[in-house]
Amino acid sequence: MNPYASLADDFYVNMTLNTEMQLPAGRETILGFFERVQKKYPTMRNFYTRDNCDFVLEEDKDNGHQRWVTLEPRRICSGQFNPEDVDNAVEQHSLILDLVPFMLSVSPLDCEALDYMMGFEFTYRGNHDELVAEALGVSPAMEGILEIPGMKMLNYEPTMTIALDDSCRRQARLTIETRTNAYQVRRGEFPEEPIVVFFTVRQYGSLESQMSYEATFAQLRTCAEQLLERHVIDQVLRPLQQAISAK
């Protein structure tokens, strides 16, 4: 069961592995990797190459939920949009991390950064930046700006990154992204688009010799979910949800 589904209109759990070295680009290697993923998840049958030469394997997009995996020159991404169960999404990401050392020659030494990311989308027709400021507030030092006669909020996207250890190699980042632009504010016409909250826990640098990618990713998940429960759900997600419901 997905305990986060009720917090937003859409929700996703993604994994990103950034590498120091270029990933293999040979036809046999790439196809062999994606065929192994498809063997586990047969519904991932859409394979294509983007204009920038990224490789993509994904499920159909019309079911309200979707699995996808991409290979870029120095990045491997795995995602699941609106998973029925968080464990199910993590299982997919763990499979990818289990495959990359021997199918793509990605050593734990080759890790530039490994991410566990959760995204929450709140669909809203209106000034996104104004709503975020209303729901989450601004610092006392900036409250006077909101009192300027005739002012209109054009950009307010709070973001914060913190270190979780003394070495600063493990970090957490909270980012809120809005879609409103000056043209929409000037005309007073707003399309129905999502406000997105991203919460990421990232491990920088090569892994310790006794650690695997899967074990490190499991640690990142535990850390992310603990921080989310203690510092994000009631402080960020629910206030946004309530502010939108009140409009």
Image (cartoon, rainbow, N blue to C red):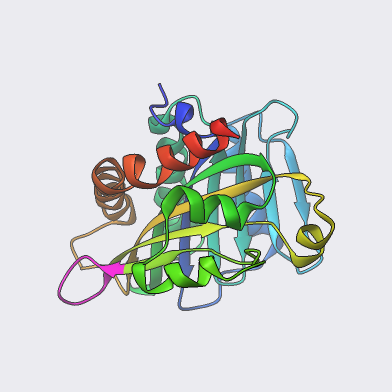
Say whether residue 147 is left or right of residue 149.
left
In the image, residue 164 lies in the stretch drawn in magenta = yes
Question: Residue at the location (47% across, 53% down)?
Answer: 198
In the image, residue 83 lies in the stretch drawn in magenta = no
Q: Relative to the observer, which residue lies in front, 39 or 60?
A: 60
x and y, in percent, of residue 161 in the image = 35, 68
x and y, in percent, of residue 125 in the image = 71, 42
Question: Residue at the location (45% across, 78% down)?
Answer: 20
Question: What is the chief secondary structure element of the magenta stretch?
Answer: loop
Residue 103 makes an appearance in the image: yes
Q: Give the extent of the magenta segment.
A: 162-170
x and y, in percent, of residue 213 in the image = 33, 56
**Looking at this rendering, what residue extends furthest in the right direction?**
187
In this view, 107 is above or below 80? below
Residue 107 makes an appearance in the image: no
> The N terminus lies in which quarter of the figure?
top left
Question: Residue at the location (38% across, 31% down)?
Answer: 87
x and y, in percent, of residue 78 in the image = 53, 49
Say whether residue 20 is left or right of residue 40.
left
Q: Quadrant of residue 168?
A: bottom left
Q: Relative to the observer, which residue lies in front, 41 or 7?
A: 7
In this view, 247 is above or below 130? above
